[in-house]
Amino acid sequence: MRVIVTGGGTGGHIYPALAIAEGIRKAQPQAEILYVGLKEGMEARLVPEAGWDFQGIAGRGLPRRLSLTLLKTVGSNLKALWQTKKIMKDFHPDLVVGTGGFVSGPVLLVASLFGVPALLHEQNVWPGMTNKLLARRVKRVMLAFADGRSHFPESCPVTVVGQPVRPSVGRVDREEALGFFGLEPGKKVLLVTGGSRGARSINRAMVSIAEKLREREDVQLIWATGTLDYEDSLAELRRLGIEPQRPGWHVAAYIEKMPHALAVADLCVCRAGATTLAELSAAGLPSILIPYPYAAENHQEFNARAMVDGGAARMVLDKEMTGEGLWQEVERLLGNAFALKEMAARAGEAMRRDALESIVGICLETAWR
């Protein structure tokens, strides 16, 4: 079995693609898998680092206005189609799986023109432009959220499969996680993260909240500031006379063992990317979601609303967030054990736990034999 996996531009497209590749390899150890991505995309670094064969193509997303850049982009994209055609002829795939991002466009389009079975996985409630355009050309669209069904034509075969997550999420022992972070049992734990690079608006609000948390001996903190804001956040805390590495606090630029943080937390403040929400669901963790306001098609807000409507989360819009307002939400939830328990149960039900197994099953059913 020979499979091409494609998806890129952001980790939200790349990591699910890698998970799918791993799932196929586990189910079919003899499968030959090739990842096709943009030569200049994140995937060009991340995929080889993960140990997968990679081939890069040209191409870029189309600008919204007429300009010289548009002409250059069209030329680059035509080159991408020619490069993809050559890859298809050389590799002879039995299946192509795309997880979104611009690079999925030429790869899935050429696959459909060659008659190669192709599948799409859409991580967000509101699908990206590439996936919407390609939906009619693939054998099946696989959705992370049931709410995404209405954004595809009725004629498109659609299956809700959920979002694949790291196997360790939801399986780490809480006592082990407490020990890893040096936290005490019997106290609430607040987890705050804006992603690997960080979210400045969340970090600014957290500096204000830190003054409140300093007085709360019953609440412990794990705060990942992101790499861009780490030093500034520490400086702001110290300006307020707050030592970041105080007992019961773990403040870091990045949390290497996020499954441990999810295991120990009682409440999470975070963005609303599809992978983040899937991990919250796998961990059964209530959350306050602050959607990234500049995401394409505002998809994070649609993701967040699906979780809120399901009773798993609360939402605060980035433009409306203040330190005081966020603290009120945090304090209200941490002080209400019943609400946290109900939200945790709803979070655990929000997304399918067998996402990867379902996706791999559809891949094996769809591939040429």
Image (cartoon, rainbow, N blue to C red):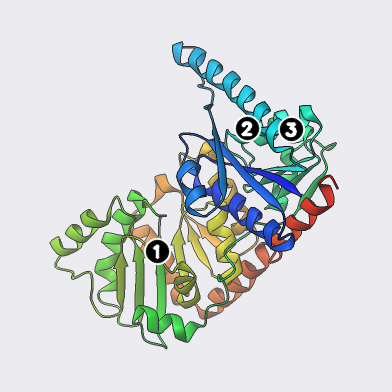
In the picture shown, does residue 140 fall above or below 279? above
Q: Position of residue 78 (x, y in %)?
A: 60, 19
Image coordinates for residue 148, horizontal then vertical, percent: 70, 46
**Residue 346 visible in the shown view:** yes
Element carrying mark 3: helix
Mark closest to the chain's N terminus, 1 or 3: 3
Out of 149 and 141, give the one closest to the viewer: 141
Residue 129 is tagged as 2
Quarter-of-image position of residue 344: bottom right
Of mark 3 and mark 2, the one earlier in the sequence is 3
What is the crowding at mark 3: few (fewer than 14 residues within 10 Å), some, or many (at least 20)? many
Relative to 147, 261 lies left or right: left
Q: Is residue 301 visible?
A: no
| Element class at badge 2 | helix
Residue marked by disc 3: 111
Q: Position of residue 26 (x, y in %)?
A: 69, 63
**Label 1 vs label 3: CA separation?**
41 Å
Residue type at the position of mark 1: Val
Q: Residue at x 59, y 25 (%)?
A: 80
How far across and down, in percent of the image, does residue 161 sit? 73, 56
Disc sitting over residue 192 in the figure: 1
The type of residue carrying mark 3 is Ala
**C-alpha gap between disc 3 and disc 2:** 18 Å
The residue shown at (33%, 58%) is 225
